[in-house]
Image (tube, grey):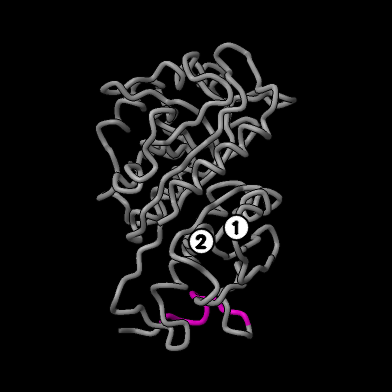
Amino acid sequence: MSRIADSELILNPDGSVYHLNLLPEHIATTVIFVGDQNRVSKITKHFDSIEFETQKREFKTVTGSYKGTRMTVMSTGIGPDNIDIVINELDALVNIDLKTRTPKTTHTQLKIVRIGTSGSLQSDIPVDSFVLAKYGLGLDGMLHSYDCESILEPRMEDAFIAHTKWNNRKARPYIVKNSSSLAAQLADDQLFLGITATAPGFYGPQGRVLRLPIEDPALNNKIDSFEFEGEKVTNMEMETSAIYGLSKLLGHKACSLNAIIANRANGTFSKDPYAAVDKLIEFTLDKLKD
């Protein structure tokens, strides 16, 4: 196999991947993503033991054991661009020989679960509940930098574009399904399922207005009212679609879980959002243990 050039796979002087500052032995095949680096310790405090930890920029990584299962917890920071860095470098750690800079002949599959917080778009999804994204709806365009047609849901995409009267000057929305087998492992009656929308920003892209007018003031209402074969957009955040798209392209399993701390449809906010997140953390760890 051809060698990957130094300019394409950038390594640190110690041989670790450039942004994450990790070597292959530092990570488990079960990986939990959080956005906030301060949330890493909220998860790893439940571990029986910790074998490794490091941080570079916003990327904090801790690997340890929870009830006999080796896991890695990593903060990704905010946005699809950070997810592009994190998943590509994680995949390189397990599927590229970093010394020869060539892809390995045997593929290693990672199991990736995001634990996040979000606001519900539907009145029947209350605060303090949990949402599992059956689909990731990308409004960011990042995945279109890759050859991704084979993993997309074009009928649902076309319906969304027609329903929202999507401005063709913006990136085409893309939709990717989660890992069915990982979703089955996480399944629980208390979970709400649906489409999680991923925005490329926090203010204008999510309909917030400070001093700048936005391109489509009615877009949020259109997103809220979209339905395709019984599937509705349950919530909006900034990472899920990129996680789903890159994971599927690279042959990894991925699911995204969110604790709902606000309900935009009825204007409510959790009285104790930290407790909701703690409950989701414990729920996820117990589901992921062997």
Which residue lies at the image location 50% right of the left edge and 41% below the top edge? 283
SS category of the residue bearing label 1? loop
Which residue lies at the image location 62% right of the left edge and 80% below the top edge? 12
Can you name the residue that lies furthest to the right here?
211
Q: Are marks 2 and 1 in contact (CB under 8 Å)?
A: yes
Which residue lies at the image location 25% right of the left edge and 32% below the top edge? 155
Residue 203, percent across and down? 65, 31
Residue 71 got which mark? 2
Residue 1, percent across and down? 30, 84
Name which quarter of the figure residue 206 lies in: top right
Is 161 contained in the magenta span? no
Q: Main secondary structure of the magenta part?
A: loop
Residue 85, percent across and down? 53, 61
Q: Amino acid at mark 1?
A: Phe
Mark 1 neighbour density, 10 Å: few (under 14) some (14–19) many (20 or more): some
Residue 213, percent across and down? 66, 23
Please state which of the two labelled residues, at mark 2 or mark 1, is closer to the viewer. Answer: 1
**Residue 223 vs residue 193, the one in the foreground:** 193
Q: Amino acid at mark 2?
A: Met
Q: Which residue is mark 1?
A: 47
Quadrant for the C terminus in the image: bottom left
Can you name the residue that lies furthest to the bottom here?
100
202 relative to 283 in the view: left or right: right
Please provide the residue range marked out in magenta.
4-12
SS category of the residue bearing label 2? strand
Name which quarter of the figure residue 54 lies in: bottom right
Mark 2 neighbour density, 10 Å: few (under 14) some (14–19) many (20 or more): many
